[in-house]
Amino acid sequence: MSDQINVYLNEWNKNAAILGFINIVGDKNVKQNKDGIIFSESMLDNFSTKYFDYFINIYEKSLSYYKIVSYRKQIEYFEQTNFENFTEDSLNHLNSYIRDTVKYYLKSSSYKAAYPFIKLNYDIERAGKELTVVSILKTKDKFADKKNEVITEVKDRFQKLTKIIDYITSDDGRKYLAAKNVIYTVINKGWDGVAFLNTGNSKKDSYIEFEKYFVQPLKEYLGVDKSKYKFSCCSCQQPIKSLKNDTLSFLQKTGYDVARKNAHAWEFQNDLAICPLCKLLYACLPAGMTYVGNQGIFVNANSSLDVLKRTNNLIKQEVHVLNKETTLNLNTYGALIRSLNEKEERGYEYELEDVQVIRYQNETYRFNILSKNIISVIVNSKRELELLRRATFSSNKERFYIYQLVLERLFNSQNLFSLIHQLIVLKVTNRSDLYYQSIHIRNLIKINQNFLEGGINVMAELDENIVNRVWYVSQLFKKGYNNPSKVAGISHKLLNALRANDRDTFMDIILNCYAYMNQTVPIEFKYIFRDREAFKTIGYSFVSGIIGPVETKNSGVENDGE
């Protein structure tokens, strides 16, 4: 019997699982073709170690483990500089680190469950309890007057912290503590309830529990005669002995408990069971997804395995870049968009075809089909999207990221008019919690124009020069009125007409305004009668221009920055 195992692309979660398996064992250890992979049975040896090593290496800097051990650099810096640069802020940071990081995590249940497997002669729990903050300074004391006493105490804490960090960074410490971190921050987003995620096994060796539940049954399955098996795996159609034990119920939000929810099955009889090979592969699903915070993403670009790998690996790379640049809320979106733009930045020829985007958010999966047209809109709007990345506003004590709101609408093939309207209304109110400018609204209008003309073809092409001219006209209009209160009132009336799709009222307001200024109505306004989308594009361009500060022609029309 050959020890070569074949696995083929299938539905999205199987594809994510296959990609996860490749990530875990390494590209060089599998043979890849267009439709799947072939690997040797020897890849199953010591698989649990490979499994955890992947997650620990990829997500290390987001783990509580790293929050503890990364402070070593601070200790070394202050010791090497003889504490010359140790300030009161440094003391506050040290105390916060001791109280909110070290002591907090060392007494957590997951850490306590790992201690028995770390074979070092050191009582870490006692060390955590005895570690205290440096509390020499009283309210009336000045740091400079007490610095020598403070430094003496800080040196003592550094000695204790060094021993704790040495314990945690030891081979066993990293192996088990970081593994506990990834179990409860990454792996449990993909599956739960079995192996080390079975509550009854929480205090057992996670590596052994993974081997017992996923790896050993597969090794046994590969070595037995399956000719008399009557059932087949619902994923790969390989023969299986029974439908009872190996079900999809352990998968998060995609499977169900067949024993307690048998009404979900046809005639209350479950026929969905998987073979041990697919069970192991599905355990790799979290390694195929890219997670950041409480979000995850997988792009099921399944025209070939190469495209699937390239797309998702680029997303993973971009997540690491974005982690350093901006907030976590933007990462899965930003990473996807940047990966779509790689054809320009790295010379890749991306196949513009419909792809399925799976996002994990708020403990559930969200599915979108990203059409060729929408991908084209995103690629063509690259610059405008980048300029929106730091634009935010608050509403009901919640912060919203305009970049994210735009992409959500594009993913759902929705135009941006309602968002544009909302942002202009908020801007007219002069609220202080709005972190965007009129130029950002202009970028939204440009993206929306790309969507309407190239994405779904509902609007006849509107020359960009016309939209730019409307922006310039808005600047002249503001100068002509030179009265912010009147302009605000006019803006509200125009916005009401736009919301009601009332071109006649909108034009009446424009005619009255220009009559008041004794000026001719600019010819650009004639295009509002072309169709509804042209009306709103020109209308919102004009209103967004009159609500901001007066800009010159160059800054308002030719430049994209403000």
Image (tube, helix red, strand yellow):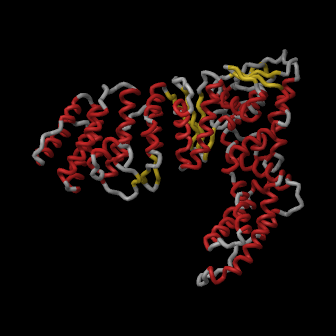
Camera-side residue: 436 or 82? 82
- Depth check: 114 or 328 in front? 328
Task: Give the residue displayed 66% in from the left and 82% down from the top.
Answer: 146
Query: How many numbered callouts?
Result: 0
In the displayed structure, 439 sits above or below 86; it is above
Q: Farthest top residue?
A: 227
Q: Is residue 259 visible?
A: no
Vertical comparison of 298 with 173: above or below: above
In the image, what residue occupies the spot 70% across and 57% down? 70
The x, y position of residue 529, in whole percent, is 21, 30
Q: Position of residue 544 (x, y in %)?
A: 30, 45
Above/below status of 112 relative to 195 = below
Q: In this orientation, does residue 244 appear?
A: yes
Q: Quadrant of the N terminus?
A: top right
Query: Residue 471, position in %: x, y?
Result: 27, 42
Q: What is the quadrant of residue 213 in the picture?
A: top right
Q: Quadrant of residue 506?
A: top left
Q: Is residue 387 left or right of residue 350?
A: left
Q: Residue at x 57, y 28 (%)?
A: 348
Front residue of this view, candidates 109 and 431? 431
Please state which of residues 333 and 440 is positioned toward the viewer in this rendering: 440
Residue 105: x and y, percent? Answer: 72, 59
